Amino acid sequence: MQFKSPGRRYALGAVAAGLVLSVLTLCPDFCPKYFTSPVAPTGSANAADGSNAANIFVAYPPDNGKVPASSSFFIGAIAPGAGLTINGQEARVSRAGFFAHVISLQPGANRFTLQLLDRASSAQGAGRPVGVTQTMTVNRDQPHPQVSGSELKVLPDSVSPAVDRGVLPGELVEFSVRATPDATVNMQLGGHVVSFYPSIALKQQVQQRKTAAKRRAAVKARTSRKSTARGATKNSQPVARIASAPSSSSQTTQMTQANDSVNVGLDAAYGQVYQRLPAARSDRYVGFIKVGPLDQFEQAAPVFTVEKDGHTATATSPYTVSVVKQPFLVQTTHDATIVRVGPGAGRITPLVKGVRLLADGWHGDEMRILYSANKHVYISKSGLSTGRIGWQPSTPGSSGPLPASTVRTINTRKDGYGDALLLPLSQRLPYQVEQSVKPNKVTLKIYGATQDTDWVSPADTDADEISKRANLEMVDGISFRQVQDGVFEVTAQIKGDRQWGYKVDYEGTTLRLRVKQAPRLAADGSLTGLKICVDPGHGGTENGSIGCNGLKEKQLNLQMALKFKTALERAGAQVIMTRTTDEETVSLDERVNIAARSDVDLLISVHNNALPDGRDPWKEHGTSTYWYQPQSTELARALKDSVISAVDFPDIGCRFQNLALCRPTAMPAVLVEVGFMIHPEEFAQMLDPRVQERVAEGLLKGVHKYLARR
């Protein structure tokens, strides 16, 4: 689930929703957080206590703040035993005085009146108002106004894609723009003129076909009833009927209906589907262009023309398109270079510094990299160099030796980390690792490599060294094959049905795949010999989400993590902490690096959850864990089950999610969301040091449970 939360905002992009959620913002690492930033009080204890019966503390939303969704919720605290109404509706309040109340929002300013009651209403009677009312304003974003049908215009700032493009001949490039409704719109680019299609027509066509289908069905039903009536009159015996195959015309109709259900505004986030934008707007037009083989335009700006009632208007796009005449060479400039499958899309194996690559286009600030004939990836320009200072898209780079090499040998070696597969290459080529637990294997794909392999052997040549190190501990077998031209694949079969981690890097131009050995554990059942990195989520300037009484998530995370550290050390484990105080600000990358540099066996990040606007805190809450690498799934399940047994919160799953603290490959890594900061009853329990101790013991039992099956 991994929602997060009323707390600090991380901006990557917006995912707007219609019915439930209008905008979700994700951090660049897909680390879960946050939507808006309520100001929390400096104190973390009872923001509303019995000494001030008229006090109403609202942790979220902030007064006069902006909320992107069609609904949100108030969370906060009042004196235990008191009641609260919000715009005349009584809020649900926990015994500790924490409340959560869902509100609906209209576009623009929404005003709310909060009234304290002397007690919560019950069967014995309603509570009576006490003290003065408190008023708050919550602003909901308003959609951009639609272009009027009476004004002839094109909106250049509505052009999509809103980035400069570098493309190859033969590519299809789609554009959209907002302009006067019910007009004729076209785009001119590099000598091409393309007619644009009004997106509202999609919706109209779908509705027309649905209406026509209903009419046909009604006619068919009437005809069938008449035929049945005539048959019953002629023959009272039942008649066996053989169903005939649908006619070609009916098949065509079914396919057309399915294919015309285009909803360009549909999106999904956090496991739910949302209407991000209207399915079709009368002022939006869509079209595409195919770059011709002779096109040679450079930094050409599309020109849009709108025509209606004999009048025309034009506008030039602020973004350009260039045809890449020839691919060019680039190379990575730092380790852990992020590689994505599409512009701003999901990640695959990062690359180390010095990997040579072939680029054949760009999408804004991301270069399009050609891994193989049928595989492109995208890498930020900031992580690449062409060897030329101040290079521009029109002159991106020069040619040279292609990123290519033969693979003549695969050597093996054991080191302090585990088993290593060594592949000597003539240069640093791009690679991708795929891990599987069932079957248990790690597969390394090398792009630009060609198989000429005739030797798989230990890297050492000394006979004594070979005798000492010949038997690999984790790798049970090695296979290799040429998948396609320029793609060489090596697979390490792993013993048993568990993996403890892997690393991939270069030693000079020798590509190394290293498989971690299992930790040497004590025979007495203790955790002696195990090294664990415990990460208290957030810290320093990163507050995380906000609890009902204003407590910051970073504080609760640290309290739980320190108790977990004590429990682990009591059991014999060596513990590495990413932070030990609330003042420390540790970046996501540094947290991962701390674990990697320490060669830990497990990485466990301790968090507490919250919801985005548009959800109900009373309905969605509980304990969950998150994993990214397949090797971490078993640990994630064990931790979740053990924490739930300890605190009895609802089970909301063990889930895959692309989070920075789950992505490491060098060890199993899991992020634990113990409970919800914004669920009044769950939050009240987590404030109790005794419950925090149970959480720590539950996490410890989860580790024991994971290790019990070796």
Image (tube, rainbow, N blue to C red):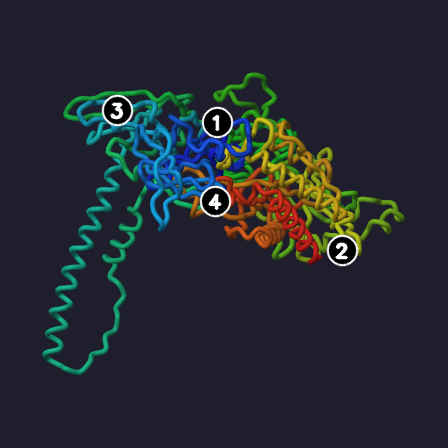
Residue 95 badge = 4
Looking at the image, is mark 3 or mark 1 nearer the viewer?
1
Q: Residue beneath label 3, please? A: 305
**N-term-proximal mark, 3 vs 1:** 1
Q: Where is residue 144 in the image (x, y as percent from the top left)?
A: 30, 28
Q: Residue beneath label 2, please? A: 525
Looking at the image, is mark 4 or mark 3 nearer the viewer?
4
Residue at screen point 58% across, 17% down:
389
**N-term-proximal mark, 2 vs 3:** 3
**CB under 8 Å between discs 1 and 2:** no
Residue 166 badge = none
Q: Residue beneath label 1, please? A: 39
Give the camera-side residue of 53 and 328.
53
The Cα–Cα distance between marks 1 and 4, rounded to whole angstroms, is: 25 Å
Looking at the image, is mark 1 or mark 2 nearer the viewer?
1
Kind of residue at disc 3: Thr
Q: Residues within 10 Å of mark 3 (few under 14, many from 20)?
A: many
Kind of residue at disc 4: Arg
Of all residues, the one furthest to the top in this rendering is 390
**N-term-proximal mark, 4 vs 2:** 4
**N-term-proximal mark, 1 vs 4:** 1
Numbered-mark total: 4
